[in-house]
Image: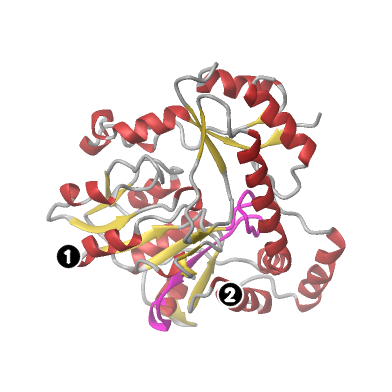
Amino acid sequence: MKNIYVTQPNMPPLEEFLPYLEKIWESKLLTNGGPFHQELEKKLAEYLGVEHLSLFTNGTIALVTALQALRITGEVITTPFSFVATAHSLLWNGIKPVFVDIDSESFNLDPDKIEAAITPQTTAILPVHVYGNPCDVQKIQKIADTYGLKVIYDAAHAFGVNYKDESLLKHGDLSILSFHATKVFNTFEGGAIICPDAKMKKRIDDLKNFGFADEVTVVAPGINGKMNEIQAAFGLLQLKHIEEAIDRRREIDARYRQHLSNVPGITCSSIEADTKYNYSYFPIMVEEGYSLSREELYEKLHQHGIYARRYFYPLITDFPMYRGIQSAKPGNLPVAKLIAERVLCLPIYPDLSKLEQQTIASIVRGD
């Protein structure tokens, strides 16, 4: 059997991509807001049900820029259970991350722990919709309003997720998407910032283009975060197939739940009725009562060419640039520590076959 990874990029047929490349070649417009870039911004905003969207070369630069766009300083409350880019974006802006424990069901920032972490230096909250599970956006917004804080959502996993019949991306002051090759929707590399009004979009667009407001005016020390035309063209092609891709992911998710429903010590994540998911990941918890430890199951799968991932292990707070922070101490983050030691994400992507999935499930069951 071929090697199976936790996710693989959605790759539409090559012959569908070639006309886009020919148009780029003929126009000689490679970047700086070309026609495919403009078209993708418009079509993504329509698909996602948001007003304003600014494309970026990747999600990390989008995070860094979002913090600058809102002029965030001082301290920002965030989660230890995420990809390191979440916290790195704070350090790149000279901001101190303050880590708060997570909820054991959603794996998201626990809103009941946020208020105790607020200090006079706190200016924002940076939660993550982990695996596309919606954060408790109402509670978080209520806290932010009470203390005068901004809310920036790292929505890297939440492309197309709807919560209570509206786009999850509408919550907070800004939301950031990743279009990395491993995401549900990808542009090879890429990302976006979702913002509420045209004025903020203009500021974000200036910042991602070195701070240029026009040909001769630089209004801020911006960065080069522009998405190029080839990325945008690939995104337009991806968008044509996105519903089919999500439907296939939904089917794979359902089969996993059926295959693993009665395995002692294996717990699948819960599904909320008021949420339309994108099925970006399939995490299981390897609990007490299972025949192997999480590490042993991880190695067993690898021995069969199945490259499951321990998302997210280690915790961000275990890395040397963070572990000296008081809020990063393990005793402050017991739930995050437990989840990180037990979680294992199984492969899920549209081209995963039923046979491959049955093989993965069989290994987990110990057949």
- Label 2: which secondary element: helix
According to the image, label 2 marks what residue?
Answer: 41
Where, by quadrant of the figure, is residue 261 drawn? Answer: top right
Q: Locate residue 265, reporting x and y percent.
A: 50, 25
- The answer for how far apart the CA atoms under marks 1 and 2 are is 34 Å
Is residue 181 depicted above or below 243 in this figure?
Answer: above
Residue at 68 percent across and 36 percent down: it is 5
Which residue is painted at 58% across and 59% down in the image? 190
Left or right relative to 227: residue 367: right
Disc 2 crowd rating (10 Å Cα; few below 14, some 14-19, many 20+) is some
Q: Over which residues does the magenta segment extend?
A: 179-200
Does residue 71 appear anywhere in the picture? Answer: yes
Left or right: residue 331 versus residue 321 is left
Residue denoted by label 1: 146
Q: Is residue 221 visible?
A: no
Residue drawn 68% across and 50% down?
251
Q: Amino acid at mark 2?
A: Glu
Q: Which mark is residue 274?
A: none
